[in-house]
Image (cartoon, grey):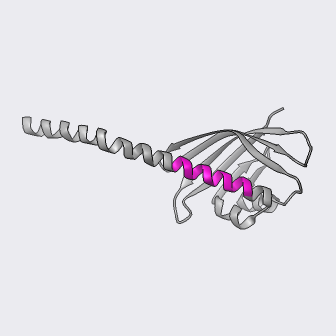
Amino acid sequence: MNHRFKLAVALAIFGAIFLSPMTRASEISDKAQIEQVENSWVTATIEADKPTLDQVLHPDFVQVTENGQIQDKAGALAAHKAVQGYSQQFSSLRIRVHGDTGVVTGVVDYRVSPGSTVQQSTFTDVFVRGGPRGWQVLSSQGTQRR
């Protein structure tokens, strides 16, 4: 019995020492991948790059727009049109990973045309990992700051 207890303690210590760094490294890698997808989404939105948008958005994608409309993936793809002078960039970004789910919360600054006033939107995007495309956006909600 004493031998089993010592073995259990040794395995617990081994796991704590050797598996924790791997978990942290994996989480950092997941965060970097999610941030890359988030940035690809922004670029594809600005350029109305529908093939990239199709790849980034999960088949079950749903978004709640700033004016309260609910759009599925097809509606979101149809709504994206290139707008001359439109720009957007993140001023704040927080990424959390929980298994195969990632949650991004942040603030995006955008201009609807060159020289227009910078507007801000707070948002939460939910990502899921799976399939050949890796991380994809499952849900998004944005609220314009006033």
Residue at image point 55% right, 49% down: 32
Q: Nearer the viewer, residue 72 or 96?
A: 96
Residue 104: image quadrant is top right
Q: In this view, does 136 lie above or below 112?
A: below
Q: In this view, does 144 lie above or below 75?
A: above
Q: Main secondary structure of the magenta part?
A: helix
Left or right? Give the position of 107 relative to 13. Answer: right
Q: Give the range drawn in magenta.
A: 30-43
Q: In this view, does 117 lie above or below 84?
A: above
Residue 119: image quadrant is top right
Residue at image point 49% right, 45% down: 28
Quadrant (top left, top right, bottom left, bottom right) of the N terminus: top left
- Residue 112: x, y in percent? 88, 48
Asked if residue 101 shows in the view, the reply is no
Residue at image point 54% right, 47% down: 31
Q: Which residue lies furthest to the front in this view?
A: 115
- Residue 37: x, y in percent? 62, 54
Quadrant (top left, top right, bottom left, bottom right) of the C terminus: top right
Q: Which of 49 and 4 is in front in this view?
A: 49
Asked if residue 23 shows in the view, the reply is yes
- Residue 96: x, y in percent? 55, 41
Asked if residue 18 is among those painted magenta in the image, a careful observer would answer no
Residue at image point 88% right, 53% down: 85
